[in-house]
Image (cartoon, helix red, strand yellow):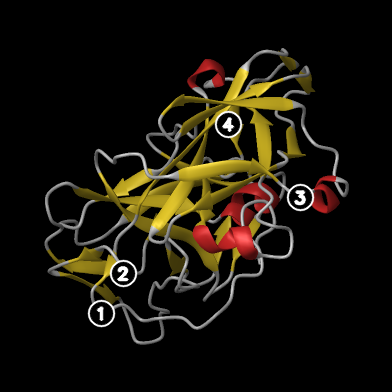
């Protein structure tokens, strides 16, 4: 049974704007589409007004988290910003705001164009203090493993359904460099839950995930690559950075998500996901 957000609805600014919606039945997030062409200059913080409003009240204990679309973070170097700080996991939206204005930065070397109607972000209804939900973090099958150079690592469940990902090799990054790695793992979770991959506190301030938080939907595990999770790591510093073997690099955890009672439903089937967005 789905977890329902009651007494809350969504309104777009004009009839030509795409209504935020979940792309598949297994998606946690509601995709956000631009209502006009946006040009983001390189290395510049820009304010964007989101093209929708919430109507009603958000029940106590829930919050709305906004994330960059994974492919925008990884391939286009698009980041969310809080007070000129991009070293964040997500932004939080307040339903009482009449206009949702967010700050973003294009970390690329060229102008970034977001076309009208293009999906660039997503929001998820989450519990403010979520309880960990069941998750199996398993190696991908051998045939998928053999297609990639897998980052040497180990996984430890340090709390129930909370996993820490530790390096078993040294990593070296040039100043500002981004590198993509195959983790060798897939996340198997229950319906109406999603997995968050976050940078570990031990390396915060040095590295970020290119998409800031990896959002893994339940149905990604049933795609052609078995839900193989890839991560893109970015050196935040202006000097060469070495991350040594034995460093705790990332955390993995799973929690519930909620949906609108009268949401617009999609009949699409997922083709990709984190690190391989389609």
The answer to which of marks 4 and 3 sits earlier in the sequence is: 3
Q: Nearer the viewer, mark 1 or mark 2?
A: 1
The residue labelled by disc 2 is 52
Q: Position of residue 133 (x, y in %)?
A: 37, 44
Query: In 3D space, how far apart are the residues under numbered discs 3 and 2 (Cα atoms)?
Result: 42 Å
Query: Which element is circle 3 on?
Result: loop
- Residue at 55% x, 63% y is 219
The image quarter containing residue 98 is bottom left
The residue at which mark 1 appears reads as: 262
Occupied quadrant, residue 172: top right
Which is nearer the eye, 1 or 90?
1
Vertical placement of 58 versus 10: above or below? above
Other residues around mark 4 within 10 Å, as few (<14) / some (14–19) / many (≥20): many
User: Could you say whether the residue bearing mark 1 is in a helix, strand or loop?
Assistant: loop
As drawn, which residue projects farthest toward the bottom? 15
Q: Marks 4 and 1, how far apart in space? A: 36 Å
The CA distance from mark 1 to mark 2 is 16 Å
Residue 102: % across, % down: 37, 50
Alpha carbon distance from label 3 to label 1: 38 Å
To which residue does mark 3 refer? 141
Q: Disc 4, disc 2: CB below 8 Å?
A: no
Mark 1 or mark 2: which comes first in sequence? 2
Depicted 17 relative to depicted 74: above or below = below
Between disc 3 and disc 1, whose residue precedes? 3
Q: Are marks 4 and 1 in contact (CB under 8 Å)?
A: no
Q: Mark 4 highlights which residue?
A: 208
Q: Secondary structure at mark 2?
A: strand
Whether residues under marks 3 and 1 lie with C-beta atoms below 8 angstroms apart, the answer is no
- Quarter holding residue 264: bottom left
């Amino acid at each position: 049974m789905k977890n329902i957000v009651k007494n809350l609805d969504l309104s777009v600014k004009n009839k030509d704007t795409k209504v935020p919606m979940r792309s598949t039945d297994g998606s946690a997030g509601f995709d956000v589409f631009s209502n006009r062409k946006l040009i983001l200059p390189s290395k510049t913080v820009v304010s964007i007004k989101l093209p929708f409003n919430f109507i009603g009240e958000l029940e106590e204990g829930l919050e709305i988290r906004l994330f960059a679309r994974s492919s925008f973070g990884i391939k286009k170097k698009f980041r969310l910003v809080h007070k000129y700080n991009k070293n964040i996991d997500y932004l939080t939206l307040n339903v009482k705001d009449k206009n949702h204005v967010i700050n973003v930065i294009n970390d690329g070397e060229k102008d970034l164009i977001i076309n009208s109607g293009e999906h660039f972000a997503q929001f998820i209804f989450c519990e403010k203090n979520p309880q960990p939900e069941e998750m199996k973090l398993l190696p991908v099958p051998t045939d998928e493993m053999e297609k990639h150079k897998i980052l040497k690592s180990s996984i430890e469940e340090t709390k129930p359904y909370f996993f820490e990902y530790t390096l078993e090799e040294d990593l070296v990054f040039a100043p500002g460099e981004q590198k993509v790695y195959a983790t060798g793992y897939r996340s198997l979770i229950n319906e109406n839950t999603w997995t968050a991959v976050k940078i570990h506190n031990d390396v915060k301030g040095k590295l970020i995930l290119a998409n800031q938080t990896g959002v893994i939907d339940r149905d990604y595990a049933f795609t052609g690559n078995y839900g193989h999770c890839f991560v893109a790591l970015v050196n935040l510093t202006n000097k060469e950075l070495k991350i040594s073997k034995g460093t705790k690099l990332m955390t993995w955890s799973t929690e519930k998500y909620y949906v609108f009672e009268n949401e617009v439903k999609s009949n699409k089937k997922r083709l990709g996901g984190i690190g391989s967005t389609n």
